[in-house]
Amino acid sequence: MTAAADALERLRHELQHPPFHAVLRPEPVSVDLETGTVVIRLPYQAIFGRAEGSPEVHGGVVATLIDMAGHAAVAVQIERMAPTIDLRIDYLRPAPARDLFATARTIKLGRAVSRVDIDIHSGDGKLVAIGRGSFSSLAPTTEGAA
């Protein structure tokens, strides 16, 4: 397998691994290891609505997608989980009830902390939210191991 194929498979793993993601059903779109960028598609589901029959996606779903994409951008590069340390979100407009796309770009891949910028676009290409996250890139410790 090529490095790009390996990275896409790692992204697929990161999106399928947590049981919570089975509810969301995120899909990997692309990985660019050179720029530290991942793109994830979140297929729209009626349960994502802000309210019953709402034409907009609940902000918590958008926040979850931002967190998921930021984590994935770091995890595909360090080849292990990257727990969230801090997350900031700016909602720019209501997310319409349609597929959403997250583009997460690693802006600093550090030994201990990595930072990622995340854009959320609706299926029609409109920017609906932006986020910035800090994620732990520390290697797991063996402290307490027998």
Image (cartoon, rainbow, N blue to C red):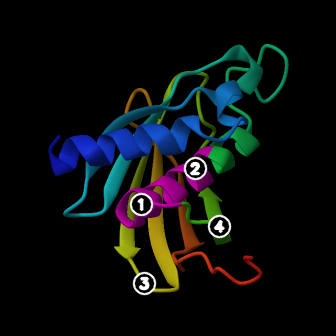
Tag of residue 68: 2
**In the picture shown, does residue 85 fall above or below 5?**
below
In the rendered structure, are the residues bearing label 4 and label 1 in contact, judged by CB atoms less than 8 Å apart? no
Secondary element under disc 1, as helix, strand or loop, is loop
Residue at the location (48% across, 75% down)?
115
Can I make out residue 31 in this image?
Answer: yes
Residue at the location (20% across, 46% down)?
4
- For the residues carrying marks 3 and 2, which lies nearer the camera in this image? 3
- For the residues carrying marks 3 and 1, which lies nearer the camera in this image? 1
- Can you say which quadrant of the picture contains the C terminus? bottom right
Q: Amino acid at mark 3?
A: Gly
Tell which circle, 3 or 4, labels the residue nearer the N-terminal end: 4
The residue where tag 1 is placed is: 79
Q: Residues within 10 Å of mark 1 (few under 14, many from 20)?
A: some
What is the magenta range? 65-80
Tell which circle, 1 or 2, labels the residue nearer the N-terminal end: 2
**In the picture shown, does residue 78 fall above or below 114?**
above
- For the residues carrying marks 1 and 2, which lies nearer the camera in this image? 1
Secondary element under disc 2, as helix, strand or loop, is helix
The residue where tag 3 is placed is: 110
Residue at the location (67% across, 47% down)?
64
